[in-house]
Image: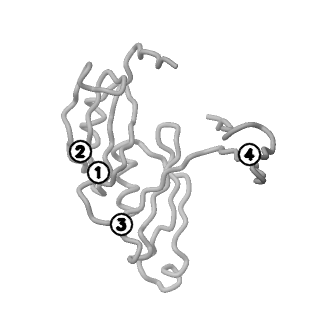
Amino acid sequence: MAQQEVTNGGSEKKTGGGNDIMEVKFTALKPQLVVEAPKANEAILFYKAAFGAEELSRTLHPKRKADQELPLILSAQLSLAGSTILVSDLADPSETPAKSEGTGLVFYLETDDVASAVNKAVGAGAVVVSEIAEGEGAGCGLSRVGKVKDPYGVVWAICSPSAKVAEVEA
């Protein structure tokens, strides 16, 4: 799948109020999941088993590798449903995010077979957050949705899009 170039703003240098603003172009958005060290490898195996992710690359933390300790994953790039996500070990304990019930992050995965996808994720170690909802109960223009939480605290909404989603009026 070819990546599209997305433009933020116009196509030329803009001026205004004494400030020159250059256009910024984005070619990809890659969310990064940072998990408690040394669990990134377990997370990668989970995403492969539960969602069919494919590992594209992996970079180990050089200091840990040199010290012959269990090498931490600095970044592993996974392909999942036509998108790319990064998975990393938390290398610096001082950067630990505040402990909470959730991460504030939800990934939506679209599929035609929601029930099988939820069952596969649960079989790989996820827990059901909400049972599969259909119709208006699914929300967000979706026909069916079920939510699971992976062993690393990330919520995954496994959904199927409605056959016909109403267009948003401008």
Label 3 vs label 1, nearer the camera: 3
Task: Pinpoint residue 71: horizontal percent, then vertical percent.
Answer: 45, 75
Front residue of 71 and 5: 5
Q: Which mark is residue 123?
A: 2
Q: Which mark is residue 97?
A: 3
Left or right position of 118 against 6: left
Residue at the location (76% across, 49% down)? 22
C-alpha separation, residue under disc 1 versus residue under disc 4:
38 Å
Write down the residue under mark 4: 23
C-alpha separation, residue under disc 1 versus residue under disc 2:
11 Å
Around disc 2, counting alpha carbons within 10 Å, would you say few (fewer than 14), some (14 to 19), or many (20 or more)?
few
Kind of residue sitting beneath label 3: Pro
Residue at the location (78% across, 52% down)? 20
Colour setting = one colour
Dividing the picture into quarters, in which one does residue 69 lie?
bottom left
Kind of residue sitting beneath label 2: Gly
Kind of residue sitting beneath label 1: Asp
Give SS at disc 2: helix
Dividing the picture into quarters, in which one does residue 91 lie?
bottom left
Label 1 vs label 4, nearer the camera: 4
Write down the residue under mark 1: 150
Residue that lies at the very extreme toward the bottom in this rendered image: 67
Above or below for 53 versus 170: below
Left or right position of 62 against 9: left
Task: Pinpoint residue 35: horizontal percent, then vertical percent.
Answer: 37, 63
